[in-house]
């Protein structure tokens, strides 16, 4: 990753130092209505204009991008202005996109305020908006000049949002080592300690960074980060069809369990680690409810996942923690068998 990642709970100092160093003509802060209220005042960084968009992924759209472009234009942004995105993945994706396209690209700094933002969305250089109900349909790869990661803003984050990001941390740990996974599965998620969490963020982001650095534009290796997501996306889409959406990380947590089952079936992933992960997911996230009547719909959703090029079902699987294989083709029979075991493990 070309961008600098700064881990600190002294966010004001870190951002002020960056502004001083970059010496921009103007400083624009982009936030959503929640982060503008609860985070921007705490951050207390001098800026010329605060640009506020409506919260929620449904507002990660062209209208919101236009609000940002309009505000930049009417408030004298130049090529040398700086955009600071303060928010979750919705704000960093949208603000990053708006900055990267305005006057062919303003520099931007991300200050993620959700756990998902910190460990996943704010780094890695993917920016974009949803378009005609398709997720992230329009966007560019544009790394932030810097990402300032802290755990101090998580105090006001709803617990569901916290857990949603924690699922991505579990994914990173599975791609790293058994010790890393053990640390996460035994961490008291109900009672977070900000300093310990900052250390855990550092470790988690490092895993993603190592993978993205080797494959910034997702041509191969980066697909490792898709672990849990082939099944997770299908659960997420099924929930939407039922008009009962689930947070992304909840679907991913259950997707991870199913893909670990497949890993055990096809690559001898240790059953003890599968069992521990399933127990953690059941206790903290609950089971995403399915029955065998949902299997055909789920399989069809998986085959049409935008990351599947051939119409086949492909997963990233593990032989052990840290030992992954991307693009493993899964037969419908194996996927159905894995879903059966998922239901047993999570007591459905
Ligand atoms: N670019 C990438 O690589 C990447 C990776 C994963 C996800 N994403 C994107 O990230 C988005 C999801 O991100 P998210 O889960 O952070 O959601 P989000 O940005 O929508 O934030 C969730 C909610 O929490 C509120 N919030 C944010 N910080 C808060 C705080 N500190 N205290 C109280 N409330 C706070 C927000 O206003 C919002 O209502 C999606 O659009 C997804 O596509 C991008
Ligand atoms: Zn994800």
Image: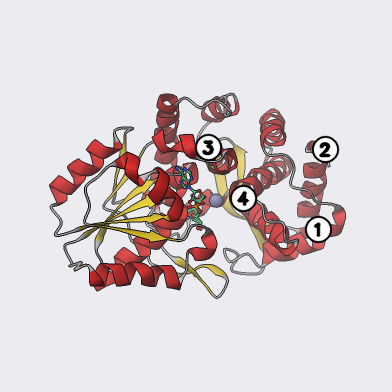
Image coords of residue 296 (percent x, y)? 81, 63
Mark 2–mark 1 distance (CA, rounded to whole Å): 17 Å
Mark 1–mark 4 distance (CA, rounded to whole Å): 21 Å
The reply to whether the C-beta atoms of the residues labelled 1 and 4 are less than 8 Å apart is: no
Please state, as top left, top right, bottom left or bottom right, where the C terminus lies in the image: top right
Crowding around mark 4 (Cα neighbors within 10 Å: few <14, some 14 to 19, many 20+) is: some
Q: Residue at x 26, y 38 (%)?
A: 12
- Residue corresponding to mark 4: 247
Circle nearer the N terminus (1, 4): 4
Specify the quadrant of the image occupied by residue 134: bottom right
Circle nearer the N terminus (2, 3): 3
Q: Residue at x 81, y 43 (%)?
A: 343
- Residue corresponding to mark 3: 322
- Residue corresponding to mark 2: 347
Image coords of residue 26 (percent x, y)? 18, 59
Circle nearer the N terminus (4, 2): 4
- Residue corresponding to mark 1: 295
Mark 3–mark 1 distance (CA, rounded to whole Å): 29 Å
Q: Is residue 133 visible?
A: yes
The answer as to whether callout 4 falls within 8 Å of ligand 1 is: yes
């Amino acid at each position: 990753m070309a961008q600098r990642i700064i881990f600190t709970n002294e966010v004001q100092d870190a951002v002020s130092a960056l502004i001083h160093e970059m010496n921009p003509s103007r400083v624009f802060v982009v936030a959503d209505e929640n982060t503008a209220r609860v985070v921007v005042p705490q951050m207390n960084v001098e800026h010329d204009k605060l640009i506020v968009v409506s919260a929620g992924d449904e507002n990660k759209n062209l209208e919101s991008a236009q609000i940002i472009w309009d505000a930049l234009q009417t408030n004298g942004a130049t090529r040398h202005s700086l955009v600071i995105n303060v928010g979750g993945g919705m704000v960093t994706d949208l603000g990053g996109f708006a900055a990267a396209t305005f006057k062919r690209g303003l520099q931007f700094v991300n200050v993620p305020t959700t756990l998902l933002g910190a460990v996943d969305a704010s780094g890695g250089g993917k920016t974009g908006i949803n378009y005609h109900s398709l997720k992230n349909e329009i966007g560019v790869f544009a790394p932030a000049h810097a990402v300032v990661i802290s755990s101090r803003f998580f105090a006001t984050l709803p617990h569901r949002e916290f857990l949603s990001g924690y699922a991505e941390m579990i994914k990173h740990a599975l791609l790293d080592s058994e010790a890393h996974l053990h640390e996460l599965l035994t961490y008291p998620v109900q009672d977070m300690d900000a300093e310990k969490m900052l250390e855990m963020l550092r470790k988690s982001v490092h895993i993603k960074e190592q993978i993205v650095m080797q494959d910034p534009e997702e041509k191969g290796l980066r697909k490792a980060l898709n672990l849990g997501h082939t099944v997770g996306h299908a659960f997420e889409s099924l929930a939407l069809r039922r008009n009962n959406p689930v947070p992304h990380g909840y679907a991913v947590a259950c997707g991870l369990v199913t893909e670990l089952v497949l890993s055990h079936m096809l690559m001898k992933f240790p059953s003890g680690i599968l069992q521990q992960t399933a127990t953690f997911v059941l206790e903290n996230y609950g089971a995403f409810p399915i029955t065998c009547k949902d299997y055909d719909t789920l399989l069809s959703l998986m085959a049409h996942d935008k990351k599947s090029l051939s119409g086949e079902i492909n997963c990233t699987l593990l032989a052990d923690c840290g030992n992954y294989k991307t693009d493993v083709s899964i037969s419908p029979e194996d996927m159905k068998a894995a879903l059966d075991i998922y239901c047993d493990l999570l007591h459905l």
